[in-house]
Image (spheres, rainbow, N blue to C red):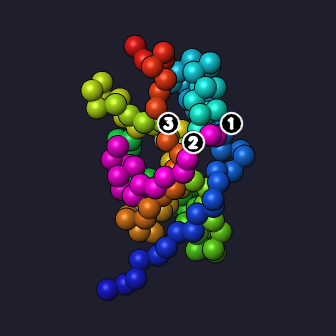
């Protein structure tokens, strides 16, 4: 049986990940809420979750390994370049809201292709109560 590839992760998200996350979140929530979430993400502790669980919780399809951004992250990993932790907004079972991958969808898919059990470092925050409803 072939040995599964490992992924190396950076200790902190890259500085450019936060504006990318905020830009995405502005499509889902008000600009003020997106700003609050981004600030919370920058202060959150890093935890890990398996790549396969992140995709399931986000209800997102696994992008093909030949997707240009996924392929770029697979190559980075093969070259020993550390990938940036992903930024997440927690879903809610009671309302049916899925996990949001605010930044890092391609990195999650790349890590899944390398090893579906990869523990992906992530920062995860909940939607503020004032923003719900």
Q: Earlier in the sequence, mark 1 or mark 2?
A: 1
Marks counted in the figure total 3
Compared with 86, 39 (above or below) is above
Q: Say which residue appears at 63% left-offset and 74% top-offset.
A: 80
Magenta residues, start to end = 42-57
- Label 2, secondary structure: give it: loop
Q: Is residue 122 left or right of residue 43?
A: left
Residue 58 location, quadrant: top left
Asked if one can make out residue 110 in the rendered structure from this viewpoint, the answer is yes
Q: Position of residue 104 (x, y in %)?
A: 55, 48
Q: Which residue is mark 3?
A: 125
Marks 2/3: CA distance?
7 Å
- Label 1, secondary structure: give it: helix
Q: Say which residue appears at 49% left-offset and 52% top-offset.
A: 47
**Which dot marks residue 19?**
1
Q: Earlier in the sequence, mark 3 or mark 1?
A: 1
2 and 3 marks in contact (CB < 8 Å)? yes
In this rendering, the label closer to the viewer, 3 or 1: 3
Q: Which residue is mark 2?
A: 44
Q: Position of residue 71 (x, y in %)?
A: 55, 62
Q: Is residue 77 left or right of residue 19?
A: left
Compared with 121, 1 (above or below) is below
Q: Nearer the viewer, residue 74 or 56?
A: 56
Compared with 40, 86 (above or below) is below
Quadrant containing the C terminus in the rendered view: top left
């Amino acid at each position: 049986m072939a040995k599964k590839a490992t992924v190396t992760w950076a200790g902190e998200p890259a500085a450019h990940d936060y504006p990318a996350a905020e830009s995405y979140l502005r499509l889902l929530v008000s600009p003020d809420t997106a700003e609050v979430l981004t600030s919370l993400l920058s202060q959150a502790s890093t935890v890990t979750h398996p790549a396969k669980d992140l995709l399931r919780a986000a209800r997102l399809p696994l992008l093909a390994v030949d997707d240009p951004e996924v392929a770029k992250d697979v190559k980075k990993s093969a070259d020993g370049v550390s990938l940036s932790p992903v930024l997440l907004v927690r879903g809610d079972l009671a309302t049916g809201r899925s996990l949001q991958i605010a930044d890092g969808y391609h990195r999650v898919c790349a890590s899944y292709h390398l090893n579906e059990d990869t523990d992906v470092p992530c920062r995860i925050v909940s939607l503020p109560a004032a923003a719900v409803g």
